[in-house]
Amino acid sequence: MEFTDEQVLRYSRHIILPEVGGKGQARIANAKVFIVGAGGLGCPVGYYLTAAGVGTIALVDNDNVEISNLQRQIAHSVNTIGMPKVESAKRTFEGLNPDVNVIALRQRISKDDIIDLIKDYDVVVDGSDNFPTRYLVNDACVMAKKPLVSGAILRFEGQVTTIMPGEGPCYRCLFEEPPPPGLVPSCQEAGVLGVLPGVIGGLQATEVLKLILGKGEVLKGELLIYNALKTTFRKVKVPKNPHCPLCGENPTITELIDYNEGYCAMQ
Amino acid sequence: MEEITPDKKINIKGLVCPYTFVKAKLAIESMDVGQVLEILLDYEEASRSIPKSMEDHGQKVLKVEKINDTDWILQIRKDRD
């Protein structure tokens, strides 16, 4: 890949790194990343991947920007209140780096379209805020064999793991089924420290770049848990579950499921 | 000493760090192992930093020569892909 003079300047701190170089930067430029959610996690993930020069970034989200989002969703602003979040984020990302093709998908995702939506992408990022979406994205990525970088936040605690279908455990190896509606509070009910998605989203973006570059080690078979109040990082080993209903030896889930009943805040 | 004919030459006069090394690195990445890159530069610090960085990246510095009041010539052999 031939870089323009401007690109040489823009990506110089990447090109200098032995693990990246011009070849790695070209891989980043050719990469396609699909981000579920343009909220607390999707904003920093998309922001940093845009800065890094990821060639194509798709964002899917059905919500509009509200003032209560601005405490943590850093791609939006007072100027985009009322606008679809994906359009607001697209505007911000395009202002940061015109090399990046941002695809804004203002819609809900469902079992009927998710496989088709992610099929042309190299990596999927889950930045959703609800269990129906989290399980749908996990199941679709396992079925489509797409690497998935999953993140979650609540109050002062966040989690990250990277699911490598066929190689490591999936989300259902850890928690077979979503919790019943109402058992686990949402961010809306329980609150979230505004910078927490920045930390977790930053970790997710780092995982994505390592997957694109093929360098380092990702959180395969590991759940990283960050506690912002204590400032601790804990890594928990997650073994592949041979009885996993999705990726185990005798899977019982062979088609996608929309867990809509009783859940609010669908993506 | 035997003169080496470079396989590729770049002129990075006018550039300062870190772009001097960025340009040199991009040039050497595009070459094959065993080939020699010749770099013409006029930023004194880069006459020291490029050879050091190239060695850190596993390449072989064959020549560092001040050719006049303002310019240096470096020759680097690509030893590692």
Image: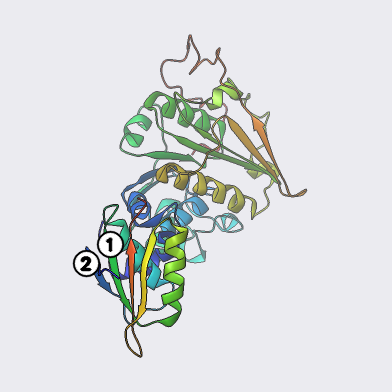
Q: Check disc 2: other Cα within 10 Å, few if <14, some if 14-19, many if 20+.
A: few
| Closer-to-camera residue (B61/A151) | B61
Q: Check disc 1: other Cα within 10 Å, few if <14, some if 14-19, many if 20+.
A: many
| Closer-to-camera residue (A68/A89) | A89
| Closer-to-camera residue (A220/B75) | B75
Provide residue B17's location: percent of width, then percent of height.
43, 75
Provide residue A89's location: percent of width, then percent of height.
43, 56
Q: Quadrant of residue A244?
A: top right
Is residue B31 found left or right of A38 in the rendered image? left
Query: What residue sits right under mark 1 in the picture?
Result: B36
Residue A49 visible in the shown view: yes
Determine the residue located farthest toward the front in the rendered image.
Answer: B1
Provide residue A132's location: percent of width, then percent of height.
52, 29
Q: Is residue A14 above or below residue A59?
A: below
Q: Is residue A133 above or below residue A11?
A: above
Q: Residue sitting at 39 percent across and 72 percent down?
A: B19
Q: Is residue B31 above or below residue A163?
A: below
Give the alpha-carbon distance from disc 2 to disc 1, as whole Å: 8 Å
Residue B5 marker: 2
Q: Is residue A94 above or below residue A33?
A: below
- Give the SS element for disc 2: loop
Is residue A215 found left or right of A189 in the rendered image? left
Q: Residue sitting at 39 percent across and 58 percent down?
A: B59
Callout 2, which amino acid?
A: Thr
Residue A3 visible in the shown view: no
**Which of the marked residues, 2 or 1, is nearer the chain's N terminus?**
2
- On-image quarter of the N terminus of chain A: bottom left
